[in-house]
Image: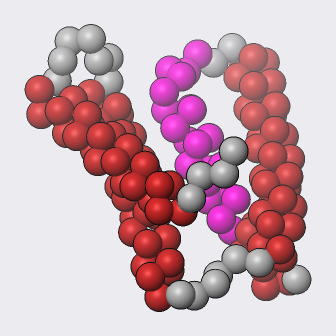
Amino acid sequence: MVINTKAQEIGSFTIGIFLVTIGIYIWAYSPTWVSSVSGAAAGLIVAGVALILIALWKYKIRKSGEIKEDERDYRIAEKASFKTFQIIFILQGVLYATLGILNIQLPAQPVVGALFAITGISYAGIFQWYRRKM
């Protein structure tokens, strides 16, 4: 099923606004059912802002008539995602083994947040590296 670009932009923008709104609600009202208000609010707001910025960036590209993507970008994305998977998989294995051997108990949220950030940053870095290389 093919979804046109305009519908994707509208969907991303709408979901982004929804996530930002929920994040602001959690931050402002601190509901009792949320265990970490600052973490949840920050995660939702950042994810929403990212979706909004991506939608606006794609809208700008579509309106200007630029063609930014070609088949090379898909190959680069494929290689970058595989390399990121390899890095994160090894990092998670070492972290899991270290925590198990040393019997260290960590709260899950900061660890998952750090791995999420490392995944995004490493993917962006590896993608740019492959883009310059190819």
Residue 32 lies, with reference to residue 83, above or below; the image says above
Residue visible at 62% across and 41% down in the picture: 115
Can residue 126 be seen here?
yes
Answer left or right for 9 relative to 45. right
Front-most of residues 56 and 34: 56
Classify the position of the N terminus by image quarter.
Answer: top right
Residue 64 place in picture, x, y as percent: 47, 88
User: In the image, is residue 119 part of the stretch drawn in magenta?
Assistant: yes
Residue 42 place in picture, x, y as percent: 32, 42
Q: What secondary structure do most residues of the magenta stretch adopt?
A: helix
Residue 99 lies, with reference to residue 117, above or below; the image says above
Residue visible at 84% across and 59% down in the picture: 78
Can residue 42 be seen here?
no
Residue visible at 27% across and 11% down in the picture: 33
Residue 113 place in picture, x, y as percent: 52, 38
Here the colouring is secondary structure
Classify the position of the C terminus by image quarter.
Answer: bottom right
Residue 24 place in picture, x, y as percent: 19, 39
Front-most of residues 22 and 15: 15
Answer left or right for 77 relative to 44. right
User: In the image, is residue 124 part of the stretch drawn in magenta?
Assistant: yes
Residue 127 image-quadrant placement: bottom right
Residue visible at 50% across and 20% down in the picture: 107
Front-most of residues 82 and 114: 82
Residue 94 image-quadrant placement: top right
Q: How many marks on residues?
A: 0
Q: Which residues are magenta?
A: 105-125
